Amino acid sequence: MTQLAISVRRAESTEAAALANLVNRAYSVEGFFVEGDRTSAAEIRELCRTGSFIVLEGEGGLAAAVYVQAGPGGATFGMLAVDPSVQGMGLGTRLVRIAEAMAEAMGASTISIELVNLREELMRWYGGLGYRPVGTAPFVEHRTVKQPCHFVAMQRTLAAPALAAA
């Protein structure tokens, strides 16, 4: 297995085009059920206003990214994307664990993600990381759907916040 020198940092909104490119390459496997790109630079810039993209950067540039947002009901993450040339090296797991740590630091007690039901391999993968299905939602996106699908919400309980000493 190739060793990667990887650094972790928050992405800047000025990197929206590079992030969109990474996400779209990683999500190209969804072409069997949906048409078009997963995201755009404009959508990435908008998401940077409401949350954070965390990136793993290697010698050749962006290797992986994930979007994290905290809310009153807990944290959510999405657009987990690993460059196809470095998939299978643990970068996705590393980013999920970083997203969870960020959520905990923001005071969230749970973290959630929505997956398309047709991506069964992802539901198994997230299940292995401790995520459990908690509901479904209609697939509402800008892309044209080639076959019926819906979102499956998966959630994981995070460590309880430490109680302050009295």
Image (cartoon, rainbow, N blue to C red):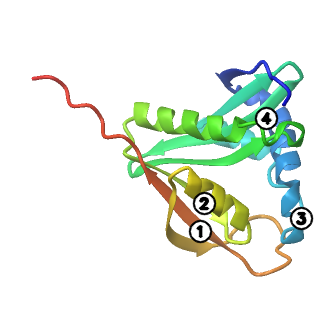
Label of residue 114 in the image: 2
Residue at the spot 15% in from the left edge and 23% down from the top edge: 165
Label of residue 16 in the image: 4
Viewer-side label of 2, 4:
2
**Secondary structure category for the residue under label 2:** strand
Disc 2 packing (10 Å; few <14; some 14–19; many ≥20): many
**Secondary structure category for the residue under label 3:** helix
Labels 2 & 1 near each other (Cβ < 8 A): yes
State the separation of the CA atoms marked 4 and 1: 27 Å
Residue at the spot 80% in from the left edge and 31% down from the top edge: 63
Residue to which mark 1 is pinned: 152
| N-term mark: 1 or 3 | 3
| N-term mark: 2 or 4 | 4
Tell me where residue 18 appears, x and y as whole percent.
85, 33
Label of residue 69 in the image: none
Q: From the viewer's perspective, tell me whether residue 61 is left or right of residue 91.
A: right
Q: Can see residue 122?
A: yes
Type of amino acid at the residue the image marks with label 4: Ala
Label of residue 31 in the image: 3
| N-term mark: 4 or 1 | 4
Quadrant containing the N terminus in the rendered view: top right
Disc 1 packing (10 Å; few <14; some 14–19; many ≥20): many
**Secondary structure category for the residue under label 4:** helix
